[in-house]
Image (cartoon, grey):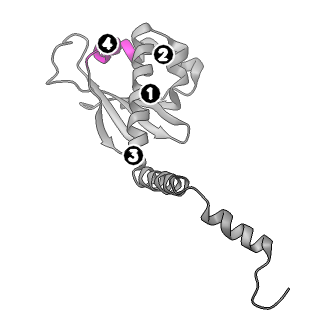
């Protein structure tokens, strides 16, 4: 190689870079910016995931599908004051009516109740007592949902009056 000259292979690699279509570079930049924007708003995914989860959960409760509801539940499931937690799926199946038809009629409530955001990782649905199903001003039965490492799950039941 003579000093001051460029090898053909070096020239070819330079030309291939310059010959790269500008739309490829721009689309790669747009893709990168899009990824960075989405990563800066992690709750955008969490909220839509919660909506999807809640739709499936409500449908399963309204249909009385104990197995499907159990799959969307984190154990142990916390219960109201002085009520033993539900430790596993078997206990959940036995106590299903206590949880969803006890103080509140969850199937009826879930048809119209709106979730309330308590934090980025927690929502609650408040239901009235089953004896007064239209008393939305007094809706103390709270179904609690949390974002866990396995996604959104039903994690507890509470009576906020106790």
Q: Position of residue 126 (x, y in %)?
A: 27, 26
Question: How far apart are labels 4 and 2 at the CA level?
Answer: 14 Å
Does 28 lie within the magenta span? no
Q: Please give the residue where the numbered disc 3 appears in the rendered image.
A: 43
Question: How far apart are labels 4 and 1 at the CA level?
Answer: 20 Å
| Residue occupying image coordinates x 16% and y 24% | 138
Residue furthest bottom in the image: 3
- Badge 2: few (under 14), some or many (20 or more) residues near its Cα, within 10 Å? some
| Label 4: which secondary element | loop
Does 101 lie within the magenta span? yes
Q: Quadrant of the N terminus?
A: bottom right
Q: Please give the residue where the numbered disc 2 appears in the rendered image.
A: 95
Q: Please give the residue where the numbered disc 4 appears in the rendered image.
A: 105
Mark sitting earlier along the chain (3/4): 3
Q: Position of residue 61 (x, y in %)?
A: 42, 14
Q: Which residues are magenta?
A: 100-112
Q: Please give the residue where the numbered disc 1 appears in the rendered image.
A: 53
Residue furthest top in the image: 63
Question: How far apart are labels 2 and 1 at the CA level?
Answer: 22 Å
| Residue occupying image coordinates x 52% and y 31% | 74
In this rendering, position of residue 131 left or right of residue 39: left
Q: Position of residue 107 (x, y in %)?
A: 35, 12
Q: Nearer the viewer, residue 15 or 132?
A: 15
- Badge 3: few (under 14), some or many (20 or more) residues near its Cα, within 10 Å? few
**151 versus 159 height, above or below:** below
Q: Which mark is residue 41?
A: none
């Amino acid at each position: 190689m003579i000093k001051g000259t460029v090898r053909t292979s070096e020239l070819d690699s330079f030309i291939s870079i310059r010959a790269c279509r500008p739309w490829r570079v721009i689309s790669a930049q747009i893709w990168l910016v899009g990824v960075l924007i989405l990563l800066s708003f992690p709750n955008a995914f969490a909220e839509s995931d919660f909506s999807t989860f809640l739709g499936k959960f409500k449908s399963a409760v309204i249909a009385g599908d104990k197995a499907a509801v159990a799959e969307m539940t984190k154990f142990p499931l916390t219960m109201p004051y002085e009520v033993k937690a539900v430790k596993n799926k078997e206990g959940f199946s036995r106590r299903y009516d206590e949880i969803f038809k006890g103080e509140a009629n969850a199937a009826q409530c879930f048809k119209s109740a709106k979730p309330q955001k308590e934090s980025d990782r927690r929502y609650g649905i408040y239901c009235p007592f089953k004896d007064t199903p239209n008393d939305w001003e007094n809706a103390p039965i709270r179904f609690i949902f949390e974002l866990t490492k396995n996604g959104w799950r039903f994690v507890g039941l509470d009576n906020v009056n106790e």
